[in-house]
Image: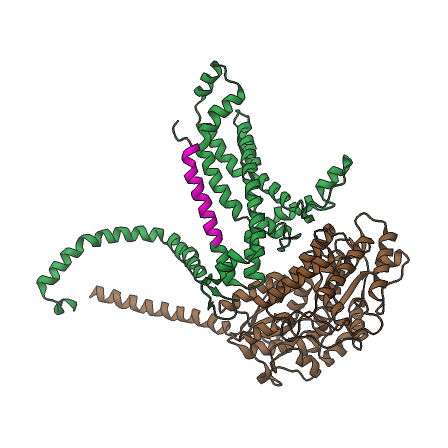
């Protein structure tokens, strides 16, 4: 039908032109079809909501009424007059600064121990990895509460040696450190990566060093650590991002309050409170975007600094 | 020709398939029209009772289904707000006095006046009970039961210790003395007579009302000043110092639900809650529990407590089967058989007919609650103005400031100043 409307030579020309793209379109259609689950997920569940939240961050939105455009007011408040934002920032930075190095040091230590040709290595590896598998779960946070409560496991153990411990999780001086301990305990995934990294270091380098009379600690600082820096770098970046986003432990242990006295008010917990306890979706969205920027800055700094301490040459 | 035959056959096949599909699609569609979604907060005890009422209702409505969903208090409001925003609100939802104004004024709830009396039977409701679900003169909520604030105490323990049980006319300082005696007599590590009520908003509200003040004014501003709050925080500082109420690191274990309440954790003998919660408390406490009023204001004080709907049923404005939803609501609040199943777990029934049928069937616990409500009926004040926008946050500010004072970070006077400043800022922000 369409052919009758267009004169023949022109349509033939168009066909010729269209021919090549059509095959490639078909090929790529197959590709896109296979990609579809991911694409739908990315656009529908990640990018779409992210863009909506970017819009909402410029509004006053309580879920029940329509969003009201307020310009940059939310961001201005975050930057100038939100004491809880600073409190949450303080808690979160302290958590990142303490938990990431401690966790990585612990992971490296265990990885080096496991790297010494242990019999039954897969079993040990699995056992050490276990806490990370269940670590972010609600159940473990509940367990943690039992361990560190006033009459919890830890204090009962301390009692045996005559020490009367405080209620660790409900004391503002110690609550955050129990969460740091929980994070360090979940050293499994960086440990596995370290272990893989350690396996990559050629044995003959150590043999040569030994012949030259290098001590164990010299070998660690001069060989192991430098050769492990690419892996270390990866772990630092991933763990830092994870630590900034930590939510479940604080939510469960403080019952969503961030208490006592905001001692466990993680940034994400504050964001959650604003959104789902006080129904300030607009403000919470702005907080979320500020967190995105903070994480991006820290990741960028890690990458920029990496050229000074990460060695990619064998 | 064979090609044609084939295509004709496949056409017929397609036709049959299509008809089957339409049939399949048609049936659930019809059933879906009578599917009601019901959403409420509460724990196991309430779930069992609610479920039984739904089953009973369905036995006389066979072409209908009820999808009933429940969550804890905090998560409930997060989910309800999200579903409402997503145009996916449940048909029948449990509503609280704290939120009904916000939901009704933003058009999220259906005004029920047009359904009275045919679909919604409020004949046996007192005018006050009907009014408690009104916003701007229209009915948006139907009371599922009356309750009031109440002290829940460990009757078994206090009797064992040979001490006097709390009674309604004991003043704040008398209750404080009793708590100190309980601490001394119990001689248990980390155990005190009473919870630290300094961070408890309903308790503060009663204390303020006895002084002629309120949490919020009708204009939505704070209804107290630095002086009131200093006195309040100092009272609880003294209570902690005397060992009458819980130490701050013990109090911090309380996360605002029955199962983390210090009474349930075995850390105190007296706690401040709501009368309908007695059922929930008793369900997880081995010792026998009792119910008493909040402390008395003493000579010349105004009434501090008030009766309020413990919770209400509301119908979503988004509901596509509003009529059926309203009928279900009516069944819950006006049918005597439903009333027997529900008991007083959601509060004492507002309908006098239901109350008369339910009262004789109650166990000790239920009777204690009914007795409590009748005991305080002539001692209560009027329902205060509803909490303004942002009020939810003030609850957590009060808790934090009381912790700051408790852990010695602030003096009561400084704590008071900070609380008033922060609370005013929250209300101004909304």
Residue A296 within the magenta-colored segment of the rendering: yes
Q: Which chain is green?
A: A
The residue at the point 85 percent across, 69 percent down is B169
Number of labelled discs? 0
Q: Which chain is brown?
A: B
Q: Vertical placement of B205 versus B250: above or below?
A: below
The residue at the point 41 percent across, 55 percent down is A41
Which residue ends up furthest to the right in the rendered image?
Answer: B162
Position of A228 with respect to B350 (left or right) is left
* Residue B96 seen anywhere in this rendered image of the structure: no
Q: Position of residue B334 (x, y in %)?
A: 67, 79
Instruction: Name the quarter where the C terminus of chain B is drawn.
Output: bottom right
Position of A272 with respect to A202 (left or right) is right
Identify which residue, A14 or A164, lies in the foreground: A164
Q: Please identify the dominant SS of the magenta region.
A: helix
Q: Position of residue B13 (x, y in %)?
A: 33, 67
Identify which residue, B233 or A240, lies in the foreground: B233
Q: Vertical placement of A78 versus A167: above or below?
A: below
The residue at the point 43 percent across, 69 percent down is B25
Q: Vertical placement of B393 versus A105: above or below?
A: below
Q: Position of residue B393 (x, y in %)?
A: 62, 63
Q: Position of residue A244 (x, y in %)?
A: 52, 47
Identify which residue, A12 or B217, lies in the foreground: B217
The residue at the point 85 percent across, 56 percent down is B180
Quadrant in which residue B3 is drawn: bottom left
Position of A244 with respect to B408 (left or right) is left
Instruction: Name the quarter where the N terminus of chain B is drawn.
Output: bottom left
- Residue segment shown in magenta: A290-310
Quadrant in which residue B231 is drawn: bottom right
């Amino acid at each position: 039908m369409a052919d009758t409307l267009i004169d023949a030579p022109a349509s033939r020309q168009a066909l010729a032109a269209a021919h090549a793209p059509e095959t490639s379109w078909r090929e790529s259609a197959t590709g896109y079809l296979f990609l579809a689950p991911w694409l739908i997920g990315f656009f529908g569940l990640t990018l779409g909501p992210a863009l909506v939240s970017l819009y909402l961050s410029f509004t006053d939105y309580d879920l029940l009424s329509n969003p009201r455009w307020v310009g940059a007011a939310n961001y201005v408040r975050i930057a100038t007059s939100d004491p809880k934002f600073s409190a949450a920032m303080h808690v979160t930075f302290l958590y990142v600064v303490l938990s990431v190095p401690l966790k990585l040091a612990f992971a490296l230590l265990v990885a080096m121990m496991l790297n010494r040709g242990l019999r039954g290595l897969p079993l040990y590896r699995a056992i050490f990895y276990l806490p990370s598998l269940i670590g972010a779960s609600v159940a473990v946070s509940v367990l943690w509460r039992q361990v560190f409560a006033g009459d919890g496991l830890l204090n009962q153990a301390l009692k045996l040696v005559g020490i009367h411990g405080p209620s660790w999780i409900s004391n503002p001086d110690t609550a955050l450190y129990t969460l740091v301990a929980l994070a360090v305990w979940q050293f499994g995934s960086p440990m596995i990566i370290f272990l893989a990294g350690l396996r990559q270091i050629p044995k003959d380098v150590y043999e040569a060093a030994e012949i030259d009379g290098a001590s164990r600690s010299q070998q660690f600082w001069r060989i192991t650590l430098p050769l492990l820096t690419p892996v270390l770098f990866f772990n630092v970046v991933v763990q830092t991002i994870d630590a900034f986003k930590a939510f479940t432990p604080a939510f469960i242990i403080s019952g969503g309050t961030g208490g006592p006295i905001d001692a466990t008010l993680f940034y994400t917990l504050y964001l959650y409170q604003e959104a789902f306890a006080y129904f300030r979706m607009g403000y919470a969205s702005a907080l979320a975007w500020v967190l995105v920027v903070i994480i991006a800055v820290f990741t960028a700094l890690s990458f920029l600094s990496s050229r000074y301490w990460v060695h990619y040459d064998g | 020709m064979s090609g044609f035959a084939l295509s004709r056959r496949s056409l017929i096949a397609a036709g049959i398939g299509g008809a089957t599909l339409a049939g399949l699609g048609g049936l659930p569609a019809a059933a879906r029209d009578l599917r009601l979604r019901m959403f409420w907060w509460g724990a196991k005890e309430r779930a069992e009772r609610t479920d039984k009422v739904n089953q009973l209702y369905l036995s006389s409505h066979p072409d209908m289904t009820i999808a009933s969903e429940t969550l804890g208090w905090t998560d409930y409001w997060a989910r309800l707000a999200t579903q409402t925003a997503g145009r996916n609100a449940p048909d029948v939802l449990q509503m609280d006095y704290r939120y009904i104004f916000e939901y009704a004024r933003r058009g999220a709830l259906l005004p029920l006046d047009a359904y009275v009396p045919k679909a919604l039977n409020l004949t046996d409701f007192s005018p006050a009970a009907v009014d408690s679900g009104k916003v701007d003169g229209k009915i948006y909520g139907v009371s599922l039961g009356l309750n009031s604030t109440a002290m829940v105490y460990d009757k078994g323990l206090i009797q064992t210790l040979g001490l006097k049980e709390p009674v309604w006319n004991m003043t704040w300082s008398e209750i404080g003395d009793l708590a100190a005696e309980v601490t001394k007599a119990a001689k248990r590590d980390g155990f005190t007579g009473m919870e630290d009520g300094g961070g408890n908003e309903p308790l503060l509200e009663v204390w303020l009302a006895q002084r002629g003040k309120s949490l919020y004014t009708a204009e939505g501003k704070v209804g107290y000043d630095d002086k009131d709050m200093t006195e309040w925080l100092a009272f609880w500082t003294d209570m902690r110092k005397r060992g009458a109420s819980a130490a701050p690191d013990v109090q911090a274990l309380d996360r605002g639900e029955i199962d983390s309440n210090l009474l349930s954790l075995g850390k105190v003998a007296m706690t401040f809650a709501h009368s309908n919660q007695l059922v929930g408390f008793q369900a997880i406490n081995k010792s026998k529990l009792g119910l008493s009023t909040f402390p008395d204001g003493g000579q010349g004080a105004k009434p501090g407590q008030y009766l309020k709907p413990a919770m209400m049923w509301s119908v979503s404005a988004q509901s596509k089967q509003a009529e059926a939803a309203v009928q279900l609501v009516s069944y819950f609040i006006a049918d005597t058989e439903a009333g027997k199943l529900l008991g007083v777990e959601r509060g004492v029934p507002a309908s006098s007919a239901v109350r008369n049928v339910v009262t004789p069937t109650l166990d000790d616990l239920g009777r204690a609650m009914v007795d409590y409500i009748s005991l305080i009926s002539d001692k209560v004040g009027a329902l205060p103005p509803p909490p303004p926008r942002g009020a939810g946050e003030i609850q957590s500010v009060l808790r934090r400031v009381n912790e700051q004072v408790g852990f010695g970070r602030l003096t009561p006077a400084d704590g008071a100043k900070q609380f008033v400043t922060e609370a005013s800022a929250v209300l101004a922000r909304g």
